[in-house]
Image (cartoon, helix red, strand yellow):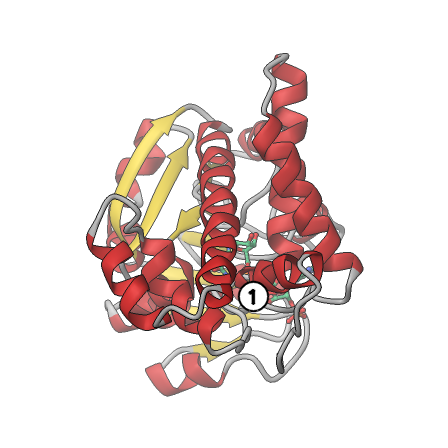
Amino acid sequence: MSTIGYLGLGIMGSPMAVNLQRAGHTVRGWNRSPGKADALFAAGGTEAGSIAEAVAGAQVVCVNVSDTPDVVQVLTGEEGAFAHCAPGTVVVDFSTIRPDVTRDLAAQAAERGLSLLDAPVSGGEQGAVDGVLSVMVGGDQEAFDDSAEVFAAVGRTVLRVGPSGAGQTVKAANQLVVAGYVEVLAEAVVLLESQGVDLEVALDVLAGGMAGSRVLEQKRSLMTGREFRPGFRVDLHHKDMGIVLDTARDAGVVMPVAALTAQLLASARANGDGDLDHSALLRGVLRLSGRDLGTA
Ligand code: NAP
């Protein structure tokens, strides 16, 4: 069992830190703004007042912050983790960020005698709470093997998918697929509502057939109840579609549905829905259809 510094106790970081503590690790959490460590306290963990304090003496440092510049700041800033980690520390970045920046950060880590694994996750807040996330890991095989007990506490499907950056590339593909599913589910819900069909029965039937999906299971009640508490914020999915489109552009591959979905997420943001769950794409379909948005 390891001493773990956990940086970022948001919607995902908090339950993942809790599961690590419950699994027998010693977790010291740090969050930029105060008041986010209650769940970790309840599980027996502690809170650090700075990144330096969180990572001191830790064998593993986990990171779970919003976007690429945030990970860069938390790791390489003057008061960042790299400056304070002991050589040999494995840094596991659970955030979703740009693959090229991950590779650069891994090279900087190696120069300091540290290992950085990119380990973005899929499965949503519920998957984090239940400790059943899918984790797609890029980086050294040895660092991956050494971190097996960390991954076991937060994930069910944990696979090393290649060298540094590969985890983030696979996650970009994941986010493309999820965005498409959420949007077409929203369109299906609006179509069904427009026909006056019993929505719950209709969605039950869809769930049992080829249209069934984890997205349908997890997002249907948010859409039908018009209750879009995140979950996974529109702002973060917008960020991820930027990664998808930049990666596609660099590779010279063409993805028209990705581009359209990215625009619909941008529209959600522009209409003030950035802090809502991405199932609020439904509100965009309603807007386009001239329908009442209901109460969100
Ligand atoms: P969240 O609830 O918005 O939490 C974001 C966390 O990042 C907060 O702790 C925030 O601190 C911290 N942060 C942001 N910028 C920072 C900076 N510059 N310096 C230090 N800390 C900073 O987001 P989340 O949903 O947990 O997502 C975290 C990561 O996991 C993202 O990369 C996201 O794409 C990914 N992810 C999320 C889900 C999901 O379903 N939510 C699923 C898979 C992957 P403050 O509290 O101070 O703002």
Q: Is residue 56 left or right of residue 23?
A: right
Q: Is residue 133 visible?
A: yes
Which residue is the extreme one toward the left?
A: 208
Percent position of residue 135, x then y? 35, 45
Q: Secondary structure at mark 1?
A: loop
Give the residue at x 37% y 70%. Answer: 199
**Quarter containing the C terminus:** bottom right
Give the residue at x 32% y 72%. Answer: 200
Q: Is residue 177 above or below residue 201?
A: above
Quadrant in the picture for residue 160: top left
| 295 or 278: nearer the viewer | 295
Q: Is residue 39 left or right of residue 273?
A: left
Q: Is residue 65 left or right of residue 17?
A: right
Percent position of residue 154, x then y? 31, 58
Give the residue at x 60% y 43%. Answer: 240
Which residue is the extreme one toward the front?
A: 195
Percent position of residue 107, x then y? 58, 27
Q: Tag 1: Cα neighbours inside 10 Å, few (<14), some, or many (≥20)? A: many
Give the residue at x 53% y 78%. Answer: 227
Q: Is residue 101 visible?
A: no
| 215 or 152: nearer the viewer | 215
Q: Which residue is mark 1?
A: 277
The quadrant where ligand 1 appears is: bottom right
